[in-house]
Each structure stands twice: as structure tokens, then as C-alpha cells.
Image: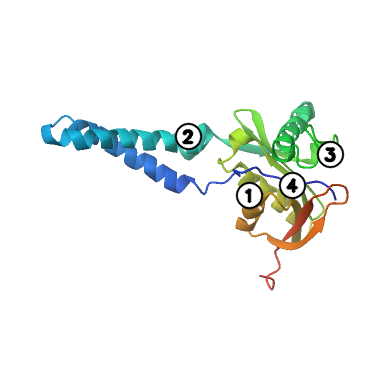
Amino acid sequence: MTTLLAFSKFVGDFRILPTTSLVVSLAAFATPWLFGISYTGRWMPVALPLSLAWVAVVLFTLVRLRVCGLWLLFGMLPMFIRRPQPQELNSVRAVVQTVVDEVYGGLWAPSPLPVDDEGWELSWIALMRGTIVGVVLTSGEWVDDLWVLREARGCGVGKRLLAHGEAEIVARGHETLKLRVVQSNVAAIEFYRHHGWRIARVFPHEKFRINLLEMFKSLRKNET
């Protein structure tokens, strides 16, 4: 199995939302009040800078959340996971190609890197506003591919696709799930660890001068 799994520096996860949404809420309530008292005599020299600081916090938080994160947070942007339609297979491959080149381009060869042309009809895709933003593909006990577009990261796409892929493997009767990831892709490794995966071994790629990690997730009750 030579397929390489990847996430970029920002993985699809909701972990940043509780803190940033709290900051947004506090800023939303505090900013009007601070602007209100900024015109009341002796408080103006203090209140006005504080007001501007709150505005900066709000803007920074919105950037961190991204538009999709905010829409998901307030339930305004549904995410759907399903099999791709035949007419969507080229789009699925294009998503994979985009992320592969972004994450690994230049690591062992210049972009565009080779991507499989077949098998994507067996994948699961994540859609937002009718656009494919992520893909997961499994076979046997393996998660072969998991890719999320940059603009959809931070929205829980990777988390949901991984859960979907894991469920598919379990439905085949496997109790130990496996995947491979490039050793230098620290963000992906931490993402998988966060979701219960562990490192089994480190080994060199059979073609390229890079190391891979094999990771596993056991569902046996006597394995921790």
C-alpha cells in the first residue's frame, strides 16, 4: 500500500471553536458598551483604546474561524457525506490532486504529484453548499486516503470523514484499523492521535526518500 495520507497544517476539527466562539460572544457584548462609555468624559482615554482592541479581537477571531466555521457554528452550513456520482469523479480526483500538491508538492518531486485515476467511486465525499470539500477512501482494514481542501479546514470535515471511514471498516468485520502517513506531516499525526490512533512502526517508503508511519486503532476491549 503506497497511498500517502495527509492533512495540511490546519486539520478539519472543531477543537478551536469553543474558545474562539467565547471570545466572539464576549466581544460582541462588550464592544457596544465600551463604545457607549467612550464618550463619557474622563473614561474616554481608556474606553476608546479598549473598544478598538475589542474590534481587533473580533476581526482576528473571525479570520481564525473562517466563514465556514461560523456558518457551521450557528447551524447555517449543513455538511453532507455520501458516495460520489459518476459525473463527480473528476471533481473528486481534482480535490485529491489539489491537496496532494499543496501538502507534498516538492517533498519528493515537483507538482503535480501522481494521483490514482481509479477507485474514487468507492470513496465518500463531504459536500458544503454543493461543493466537494473532502474525500475519504478505505479498503479492507485500511484508511487509504483522507483529504480536505484548505478552505474547509477547521470545520469538522476531517473528523466526520474519518469517523465515516472507520465505520465502514468496522462494518467489514475488522477490529483493528490501519493507515499510513508521512512522518514529516506532524499535523496529520496529531489529528489521528487525537482520534484514538497510535503509531505502530516507522519505515522508509519503497520508492521515495521519505519515512512513513503506520498507525492503528484497535477496537478490542482488552487493547488500550
Image coordinates for residue 216, horizontal then vertical, percent: 73, 60
Q: Which mark is residue 5?
A: 4
Which amino acid is tagged 3? Gly
From the viewer's side, name the closer residue of 63 and 48.
Answer: 48
Q: CA distance from mark 1 to mark 3?
A: 26 Å
**For the point 69% across and 71% down, which residue is it?**
223
Evaluate if marks 3 and 2 touch, with contact meaning CB atoms under 8 Å apart.
no
Crowdedness of circle 3 by 10 Å Cα count: few (<14), some, many (20+)? few
First along the sequence among labels 3 and 2: 2
| In this rendering, the label closer to the viewer, 3 or 4 | 4
Give how far apart the Cα atoms at labels 1 and 4 are: 11 Å
> Under tag 3, what secondary structure?
loop
Disc 2 to disc 4: CB gap under 8 Å: no
Name the residue beneath numbered marker 2. 63
* Residue 80 can be seen, yes or no: yes
The residue identified by callout 1 is 187
**Marks 2/1: CA distance?**
20 Å
How many residues crowd around disc 1 within 10 Å: few (fewer than 14), some, or many (20 or more)? some
Amino acid type of disc 2?
Answer: Val
Which tag, 2 or 4, sits closer to the chain's start? Answer: 4
Q: Nearer the viewer, mark 1 or mark 3?
A: 1
Q: Quadrant of the C terminus?
A: bottom right
Q: Is residue 14 above or below residue 89?
A: below
Helix, strand or loop status at disc 1: helix
The first of marks 2 and 1 along the sequence is 2
Q: Earlier in the sequence, mark 1 or mark 4?
A: 4
Residue 74 tag number = none
Amino acid type indicated by mark 4: Leu
Q: Is residue 212 left or right of residue 35?
A: right
Disc ID at residue 119: 3
